[in-house]
Amino acid sequence: MNIILLGPPGAGKGTQATRLVEHHGMRQLSTGDMLRAAVKAQTPVGLKAKAIMDRGELVSDEVVSALIDAELTAMGDHVGAIFDGYPRTAPQAGQLDEILAGHGRKLDHVIELEVDEDALVDRITGRFTCANCGEGYHDRYKLPAVEGVCDRCGSTEFKRRPDDNEETVRTRMAEYRAKTAPILPIYEARGIVSRVDGMAPIGEVTAAIEGILAKR
């Protein structure tokens, strides 16, 4: 099974993709994670991508498509894929079709996580993680049980993503509306688009997605 999870940054795509990996043995292909890995490694592509992402803009189709193709090759054609944050534009949608065909694959579902922009800004700007184990927290909704100490590993080191600020979030929302939303008709014409309330509790979102996958 090959599916796309759509929605603006912070809609919960990564969380739901992780659950699909656990439940179905699929592989999550997150362009954000792949790009951050390239940035951390300070590759030429990573350095270029960092400057673009810091401005809240999107990296080039060529870079993203190359990353996706390489990941599909590495994982093997027998493993289902979850595309998290890709494709973002109509050209990328066309490129994804070509990449999948080259691997003997096709899309089964496109699931959009719908969100409220103001609520999403609040969700993203307050989040932070443990620098040691990656456990996620939020200034208003999920603070550590003991102030300054990670619940999971006991570390006292925390970090925030530099692009988790209101200006960048709203820039990304505008990018999503302008470029990503228009790709939906492409998949609606194929009858494979479903929508889920991305602002619902995580468990309810998961249940809704599982219900969609069970239909086919």
Image (cartoon, rainbow, N blue to C red):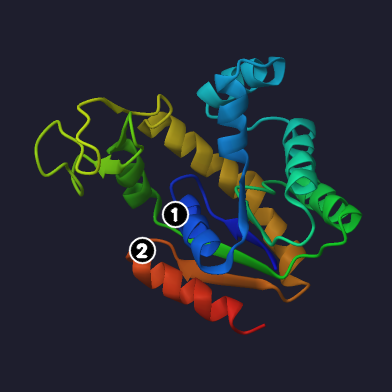
Residue tagged 2: 202
- Residue 195 % position (x, y): 54, 70
Instruction: Give residue 15's mark.
Output: 1
Out of 93 and 159, give the one closest to the viewer.
159
How busy is the neighbourhood of tag 1: few (under 14 within 10 Å), some, or many (20 plus)?
some
* Residue 188 visible in rendering: yes
How far apart are the alpha carbons under marks 2 and 1?
A: 8 Å
Looking at the image, residue 105 lies above or below residue 124? below
Tag 1's secondary structure?
helix
Residue at horizontal 32 percent and vertical 51 percent from the top: 119
Q: Relative to 33, is 16 above or below? A: below
Q: Quadrant of residue 41?
A: top right
In the figure, is residue 186 to the left or right of 170?
right
Instruction: Assess whether mark 1 and mark 2 are in contact (beta carbons under 8 angstroms).
Output: yes
Q: Residue at x 79, y 43 (%)?
A: 69
Q: Is residue 103 above or below residue 40?
A: below
Figure label count:
2
Amino acid at the residue labelled 1: Thr
Quadrant where the N terminus is found in the figure: bottom right
